[in-house]
Image (cartoon, rainbow, N blue to C red):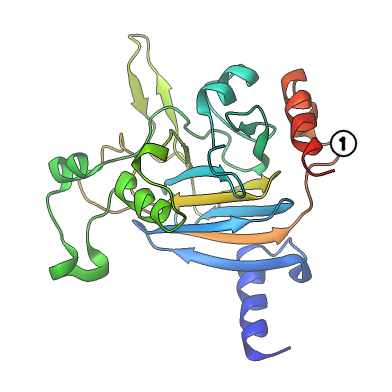
Amino acid sequence: MNAFDHEATAHAAALAPDLDPARVLWTERFPGGAHWSYRARRGTTLRLIDVDGGANASVLLYRADERLERLNIPDTLKAQHTAHLTAGHVLYSDMGRILASISRDTVGWHDPLCGVSDADMVLRRHGVQRYQEHRNAMYRNGKDSLLVEMGKWGLGLRDFVPGVNLFSKVVVDGDGALRFVPQHTKAGDFVELRCEMDTLVLISTAPHPLDPRADYAPGKVALVAWDSGPAAMDDACRLSCPENGRGFQNTDIIYR
């Protein structure tokens, strides 16, 4: 084992001591306001970790080998009769297949309703802090950050779809208004996305669009990717509702 392997193993042990280091593929640490993308193979699980509490991770998913197939949030919610996401839920494509499933979750509630922040929103709330003067301390927004990552894979504005905001909770009050719940997560909380297809995963750690904090202070997120294999036949995500069983069947067919 070389020095790089020793360092990677140490990072994995620190971030996810319950995982077998031999199955860990890579680790990442994202500052608040960062963006990242990766092509993850079927059977890869991504554990996203809220480092300090109060983070937001906006996620988009596309089928890696046919990017016209992508995450469909309305079908995801309708098929599972839910307005939030947690362990046991899956993320559907617009072709009725399962791009990823939520295999483990210490948070209990993730927001699929509110989309991402944009440049005007960040400008109104926080003002301007540009790269020319502030370098990596510049103010980033979720939409532009994800579009940067999309461009790396031949995707553009017309391919932008609604995503899910991990670590954020939004509820609907008695008047029908959306209400952001502050301090929803604590340091060390995590959620696992298990890729059930070869999946292009895009992540932004810019603030949630309804986060009321006046200061621009998005939280840090860490990631551990590991080889879990796809959902087993008795997996809770597969069995949680009849629709999910059919979705997994549609997915498994293309990998036989």
For this orientation, the residue located farthest to the top is 175
Say above or below: 66 vs 181.
Answer: below
Asked which secondary structure carries label 1, the reply is loop
Horizontally, residue 78 falls left or right of residue 159, namely right
Is any part of residue 51 visible from this angle?
Answer: no
Q: Position of residue 61 (x, y in %)?
A: 54, 43
Q: Mark 1 belongs to which amino acid?
A: Met
The residue lying at 35 percent from left, 25 percent from top is 179
Horizontally, residue 95 falls left or right of residue 250, namely left
Q: Position of residue 3 (x, y in %)?
A: 64, 90
Mark 1 surroundings within 10 Å by alpha-carbon count, few (fewer than 14), some (14 through 19), many (20 or more):
few
**Based on the displayed image, in which of its 4 quarters is residue 148 positioned?**
bottom left
User: Which residue in the structure is indicated by mark 1?
Assistant: 233
Of residue 232 and residue 49, the one placed in the foreground of this image is 232
**Based on the displayed image, in which of its 4 quarters is residue 181 positioned?**
top left
Q: Position of residue 36 (x, y in %)?
A: 45, 59
Of residue 140 and residue 155, the one placed in the foreground of this image is 155
Query: Quadrant of the image for the N terminus?
Result: bottom right
Q: Position of residue 90 (x, y in %)?
A: 65, 33
Query: Quadrant of the image for the C terminus?
Result: top right
Is any part of residue 174 visible from this angle?
Answer: yes
Horizontally, residue 1 falls left or right of residue 121, namely right
The residue lying at 79 percent from left, 52 percent from top is 229
The residue lying at 72 percent from left, 20 percent from top is 243
